[in-house]
Image (spheres, grey):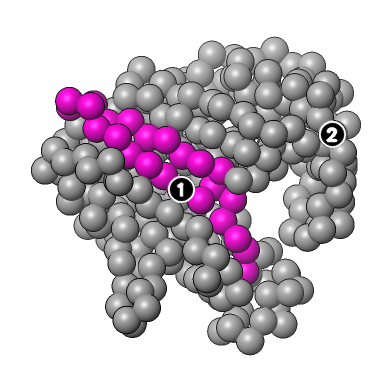
Amino acid sequence: MKQYLELCQRIVDEGVWVTNERTGKRCLTVINADLEYDVAGNQFPLITTRKSFWKAAIAEFLGYIRGYDNAADFRKLGAKTWDANANLNQAWLANPHRRGADDMGRVYGVQGRRWAKPDGGFVDQLRKIVDNLSRGIDDRGEIMSFYNPGEFHMGCLRPCMHTHNFSLLGDTLYLTSYQRSCDVPLGLNFNQVQVFTFLALMAQITGHKPGVAYHKIVNAHIYEDQLPLMRDVQLKRKPFPAPQLEINPDIKSLEDLETWVTMDDFKVHNYQHHEAIQYPFSV
């Protein structure tokens, strides 16, 4: 919470106004933010100065792991986060690559599990990482990237958090995640939860101890219609101690994550929080 609140205060104090072309709104913006999450100590980075709906964040990332490309599949897991971008984004609705209602196109998990090769085949980036780490191998390229400029026109949204880089030191696994753009009031807590959970899951299924998850954000911003709520409400609240995340120990493989795992396999303990804040969402 300390580093989250410090980033929010930094944006309020030092941010520069930038107009966002996609949304038509202004954003108070800073460049470069580095966050760290203690996965080894299970200090789950769930925001306590407002109620945060962590299940949707984990459900969304589970959909990425499975390579989902349809908002309906995300909804079945418990995440409605792709409904708007799949069905209300006017540029995507007019895109000839869109295949109908709820279609997201070739975004996020699709790239992570089925990166298209020029010869017509696909690369399963995540499978390679899991196989290597399970054998104790770190070739300095244990990287999963969702950022494929050659297929931006075939998806409803460019990835914001675009690359996850795993590193193995002895029997301890680390993760460095890179994010090009971050809606701090709404998106960051989702992203924090996902980075933390991804490292915890990957350590569990590859047989390693989790270490620290490093989260680098390039463009961190607060939209102009979010600023009063952040400045005058959330930043005035006193944070509570970090909760803990419990993951079902029966999850032992990538195949488990692809098939039977649901939100019932995740629990959060000791989560104290202030009332929810309804921040505006920009499509």
Secondary structure that dominates the magenta span: strand
Quarter of the image where the C terminus is located: bottom right
Query: Vertically, is 266 above or below 144?
Result: above
Q: Amino acid at mark 1?
A: Thr
**Under tag 2, what secondary structure?**
strand
Q: Residue at x 76, y 21 (%)?
A: 9
| Residue at horizontal 50 percent and vertical 33 percent from the top | 215
Identify residue for label 2: 16
What type is the residue that disc 2 sits on?
A: Val
- The residue lying at 75 percent from left, 22 percent from top is 10
The answer to whether any part of residue 145 appears in the image is yes
- Give the x, y percent position of residue 179: 56, 43
Magenta extent: 155-179
Task: Bin the neighbour count of mark 1 within 10 Å (Cα to Cα): few under 14, some 14-19, many 20 and up.
Answer: some
Task: Provide residue 206's location: percent of width, then percent of height.
Answer: 19, 41
Q: What is the tally of numbered marks visible in this picture? A: 2
Quarter containing the N terminus:
top right
Label 2 crowding class (10 Å Cα cut-off): few <14, some 14-19, many 20+? some
Q: Please tell me in which quadrant of the rendered image residue 222 appears.
A: top right
Foreground of the two, 94 or 46: 94
Residue found at x 86% / y 49%: 19
Pick whichever of labels 1 and 2 is earlier in the sequence: 2
From this view, report whether residue 241 is shown above or below residue 209: above
Relative to 283, residue 188 above or below? above
Which residue is label 1 attached to?
163
Q: Is residue 164 magenta?
A: yes
Percent coordinates x, y for residue 272 in the rendering: 57, 20
